[in-house]
């Protein structure tokens, strides 16, 4: 990197040269400095020359003396001098490295990703707050290699400096939380104080963690979905083989196997239905439903529809619903699905309690309706509660499968509630049952909505 001049007089000379547009890359030579000084004193020298010439012509001064006098004036013009107390204003670009300018610092600090600007040797020139947070050991003026101990980063930095080419490297950080960063080191040509070019290195870190997580979730989802489909499919083809082979002439076995095949086919159809419903709700997640729906008849309809299942399981459904309408802005089909999932779960997994309560309460200050489905079954161990709404998550996979479950019900419930700007609260005490509360914001009164 070119050094800035440290002598004020020299600086003045260079400033004068800069104004005259004669600045070159290297340090100014003695000859060029003299030429500049003569150029600066040109008017004085011209006038002095004319006066001395006139005096010599008119005989006031002998020619040799006139020449000596002119030579003395020229020498005086070549002497570097300045008035005491007069500070010569030198452009800041000449006294400082342009890359260290506040404007560059402002640009680096304005970049949202962690960003560090290094000089050619790898010393930190600027870093923004995000970079300081990411690598607290980074210090201005110190080598970045010492602060960023990761071998991948140090190697990439060395290579980028040596080749003056862009380098990209993925870095995995395990503490305090696991995250993935992509580091890009880009050489940036920057002007030097004397109009030359130097290469700095711009290091920027891009957080890839959300992308990785989505990628992992997608892979998990595909694996889960295909596994869930493969199981009933394998059962179906196994029974087909049996029916075509050993059980061909056994009417009783045929009847029994056809019943199982029907159940498996229904399960596959349900899984596909649930997956389609999930993707539909996700696609329209940003569009809030706006139809005014009364929750009371919807809950009643679902409870009545599940009476047959309740009887089968020996459970009674008790409803505690208000007389007045409970209006929300919603999608009727989705709300039916939501309550169907919650009440069906209570009937399937809380059957041992023998009773399921469905209640609707209006929470006036929070301006929302709370629909609670409570069962008195075995309850849910606390460690499972945070993950219950994940796709395919089941407390006991065997138990859920035996009930014909796919593990998508609560995930669908969560997405439907999100779309309705509501939330799901799960409360359970082991051995005492579980309560699932769907909170839905009240619709604005019609008079407000119109105004
Ligand atoms: N009331 C409840 N009591 C105990 N466990 C429950 C209750 N509700 C849900 N669970 C547990 O949560 C898991 C996830 O429920 P979810 O409704 O998402 O899936 P599922 O019922 O297994 O399948 P699907 O709803 O698609 O038929 C269930 O498998 C069950 O283990
Ligand atoms: Mg369910």
Image: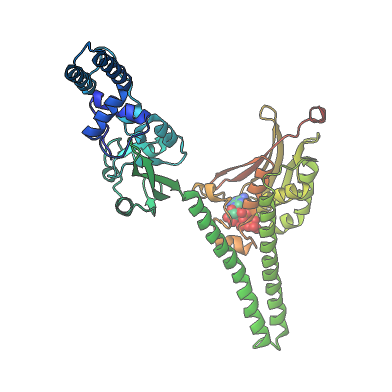
Q: How many marks?
A: 0
Residue ID at (37%, 30%): 20
Residue 45: x and y in percent read 28, 20
In the displayed structure, 446 sits above or below 242; it is above
In the displayed structure, 171 sits above or below 253; it is above
**Location of residue 39 (image quadrant):** top left
Is residue 261 shown left or right of residue 207? Answer: right
Is residue 219 shown left or right of residue 102? Answer: right
Image quadrant holding the C terminus, namely top right
User: Does residue 116 appear anywhere in the picture?
Assistant: yes
Please tell me which residue lies in front, 69 or 434.
69
User: Does residue 321 appear anywhere in the picture?
Assistant: no
**Location of residue 277 (image quadrant):** bottom right
Image quadrant holding the N terminus, namely top left
Residue 425: x and y in percent read 60, 41
In the displayed structure, 331 sits above or below 392; it is above
Please tell me which residue lies in front, 163 or 140.
163
Residue ID at (71%, 72%): 262
């Amino acid at each position: 990197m070119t050094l800035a001049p440290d002598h004020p007089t020299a600086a003045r000379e260079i400033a004068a040269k800069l104004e005259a547009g004669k600045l070159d890359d290297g340090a100014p030579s003695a000859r060029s400095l003299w030429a500049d000084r003569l150029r600066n004193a040109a008017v004085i020298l011209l006038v002095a020359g004319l006066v001395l010439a006139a005096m010599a012509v008119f005989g006031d001064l002998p020619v040799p003396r006139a020449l000596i006098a002119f030579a003395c004036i020229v020498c005086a013009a070549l002497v570097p001098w300045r008035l005491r107390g007069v500070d010569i204003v030198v452009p800041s670009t000449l006294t400082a490295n342009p890359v260290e300018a506040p404007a560059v610092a402002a640009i680096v600090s304005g970049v949202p990703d962690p960003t560090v600007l290094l000089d050619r040797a790898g010393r930190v020139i600027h870093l923004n707050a995000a970079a300081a947070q990411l690598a607290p050991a980074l210090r201005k003026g110190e080598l970045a290699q010492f602060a960023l101990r990761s071998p991948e980063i140090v190697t990439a930095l060395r290579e980028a400096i040596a080749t003056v080419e862009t380098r990209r490297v993925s870095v995995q950080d395990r503490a305090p939380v696991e995250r993935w960063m992509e580091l890009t080191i880009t050489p940036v040509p920057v002007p030097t104080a004397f109009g030359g070019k130097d290469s700095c290195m711009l290091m920027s870190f891009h957080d890839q963690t959300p992308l990785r997580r989505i990628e992992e979730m997608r892979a998990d989802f595909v694996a889960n979905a295909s596994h869930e489909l493969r199981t009933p499919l394998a059962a179906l083809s196994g029974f087909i083989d049996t029916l075509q082979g050993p059980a061909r002439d056994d009417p009783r076995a045929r009847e029994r196997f056809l019943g199982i095949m029907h159940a498996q086919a229904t399960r596959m159809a349900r899984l596909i239905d649930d997956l389609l419903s999930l993707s539909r709700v996700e696609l329209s997640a940003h569009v809030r439903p706006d139809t005014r729906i009364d929750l009371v008849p919807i809950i009643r309809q679902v409870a009545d529809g599940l009476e047959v299942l309740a009887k089968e399981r020996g459970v009674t459904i008790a409803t505690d619903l208000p007389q007045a309408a409970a209006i929300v802005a919603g999608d009727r089909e989705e709300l039916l699905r939501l309550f169907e999932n919650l009440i069906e779960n209570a009937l399937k997994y809380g059957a041992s309690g023998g009773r399921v309560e469905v209640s609707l309460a209006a929470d006036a200050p929070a301006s929302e309706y709370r629909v609670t489905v409570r069962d008195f079954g075995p309850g849910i161990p606390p460690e499972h509660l945070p993950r219950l709404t994940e796709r395919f998550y089941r407390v006991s996979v065997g138990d859920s499968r035996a009930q014909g479950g796919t593990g998508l019900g609560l995930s669908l419930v969560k997405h439907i509630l999100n779309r309705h700007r509501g939330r799901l609260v799960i409360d359970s005490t082991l051995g005492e049952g579980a309560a699932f509360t769907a909170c839905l914001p009240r619709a604005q009164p019609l008079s407000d909505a119109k105004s």
